Amino acid sequence: MNFKDLEIFDFALSEHLLSSPDETISASERVIRGLDLPFEGGTPEIHVAFINLPVDSQLLVRDIRSDHVGSLIAVSGVVRKTADIRPKLVVGNYECQRCGHTMKIPQHDIRIKEPYLCEACETRGPFKLLSTDSRLSNFQKILIQERLEDVRGREHPKQLTIFLEDDLTGLVMPGDKLELVGVLRTSQDFKTKSRVFNIHLEGIFVRPVEVEFEEINITKEDEEKILKLAKDPKIYDLIRDSIAPHIYGFHDVKTAVMYQLFSAPRIEMLDGGKIRGDSHILILGEPATGKSEILQYVANELAPKGVFTSGKGATGAGLTATAVKDDFGDGGWSLEAGALVLADRGIACIDEFDKMTNEDRSAMHEAMEQQTVSIAKAGMLAQFSARTAILAAANPKYGRFDQYRSISEQINLPPTIISRFDLLFTVRDVIDDTKMIAKHILDSVLTPSKVSPPISPKFLRLMVAYARQNCFPVLTVEARNELETYYVARREASRDAAIPLTARQLWAVIRLSRASARVRLSDEATVEDARNAIRLLDASLQDVGIDIESGAVDIDLIMTGVTKTQRDKIQIVLGFIRELEKEYKTAKKREIIKMAEEKGIDKRDVDRLLEVLKTNGEIYEPMFDQFKIA
């Protein structure tokens, strides 16, 4: 029932409902059961629920107080945990063990209520509960937490336990966004007998809702300002300079973050396949260059739904989802959603990404590409949505970058995870920029107005929200041809040399092109948008995809960690080992080095390649500095 209808019909009754919901709801259910309604097969179970409560009764979890106990309230949140559905005793059928008389006892409290005296023999039992003849209903406990857009990333989201019964059970999964109406209850911890009570919401109405990244109320006045700003020819520069303006430089990174915020619409194929529209960005930077500040600014100031976490304090289960056995499920298994699931349709910022263990990072593979999280544990099979863009930061393995070594050698990340990022950028502490950085920092301290953002974070969030609500760009024929020409030309030019691009990079520029169009609030991605995307991808590849030995862009450096030049040398060294093995049964290292130097391969390269081959299990070392093919 719509509360507003009840308010119009009888205002006093509607006020009584809010303050004394148990009395009002039970009375309404009795009335409905007494009506002569045309039910087939007997009267069904009747439940009365109310929606659209007045604003005063719509609360954030953090605003719930003791005054609300016993009242009808509405809350919204994200499901964090769900316990198994269990039977709950509603009316207990008790048998007296002395005379055999049975009695039905309604159950209202948390603890089971037994008969005090037998109605027939008037003795105090003992009594036996006949569970098969008792009335049971389905019961499920869930845990919700405040939506990330309500807390803005600055505070720890508050949580609330929800009790659901009968037809409300089994409707939700971890990560779902809910609107709930229920009666706030208290319960005592009988073990400690504390005066401080626990609270939970006894739900009478549950509605899963699809809360978008951009669910922000935009007024007509805001809309007019947004449309006017989108027509500014310098819109790209204005938005880029509004991203962490107190951090000097980072032009390409901030441009990439701009496209990540606006994102591209998800592509749903006719055959059921789905292509993500969110771009993932990895910043590889030296210490004290401002990476963490960028991530914090995006998570706390710009993203309407942003999560910030550090790799040191994050696990694979904490980022994705897990099945846990704890007291919440009363000793049973419960499903718990992680950060990427809770940030669905938002941005997850992960600092110190290289400090995570390989096992924890591998848990993210599915979430990054398919944008789902699958759980198969303790007989529980579940899949959650994780349509989340990832902005990650990592440090070089040895503290600073070595210009004479490839990036892949200096990053403590496996190629399997690096290849899932659309864009990778390196940030170096360059001596030439010292004066400008010092000036920028001192300006921000002495004259903050000099580094104030051209567009305020609040208004930029509104603009991102408006764009994602209303703009769904498609590639024009000219833009399509531009991307096709770029991809084919790069591939054809390197037919027998290094691989400059793969299909993943083509999808990346498609996403970036459509995001570029969204920045201008356009429904068409033009040639200029395609060129913006190509320029940004080229800048990224120039940063991390250069083969030091050949000087060419080789995407395999990112995808596999081994360039074509290195692969060719590996095959040459393997050929030497086979040749020497045939003649001497084993290949001595000094002989391999001698043959390699005749082919122009340096001794240090031979040492490194032999280690790679041993690690991959292609050769083994039966005796010191002697090798055989595995």
Image (tube, grey):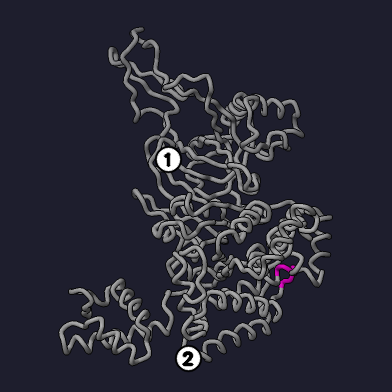
What secondary structure predominates along the stretch shown in magenta?
Answer: loop
- Quadrant assignment, res 120: top left
- Give the percent coordinates (x, y) of residue 449: 80, 55
Instruction: Write the residue at 37% across / 36% down.
Output: 331
Give the residue number, with chain letter if any, for mark 1: 85
Q: Position of residue 10 (x, y in %)?
A: 75, 29
Task: Please report contact status of discs 2 and 1: CB closer than 8 Å, yes or no.
Answer: no
Judged left or right of residue 56, residue 320 is left
Is 429 displayed left or right of 131 in the figure?
Answer: right
At label 1, counting other C-alpha atoms closer than 10 Å, the crowd grade (few under 14, some 14-19, many 20 or more) is some
Which residue does the image show at 66% across and 53% down from the upper left?
304
Query: Which x, y percent locates residue 420?
Result: 49, 68
The N terminus lies in which quarter of the figure? top right
Q: Which residues are magenta?
A: 518-523
Residue that carries the numbered disc 2 in the rendered image? 495
Amino acid on which disc 1 is placed = Ile
Three-letter code for the amino acid on which mark 2 is drawn: Arg
**Which residue is rendered at x = 61% and y = 72% of the image?**
511
Q: Is residue 519 magenta?
A: yes
Q: Where residue 509 is drawn, which disc sits there? A: none
Give the answer, above or below, for where 437 lies relative to 447: below
Where the C terminus falls, by quadrant?
Answer: bottom left
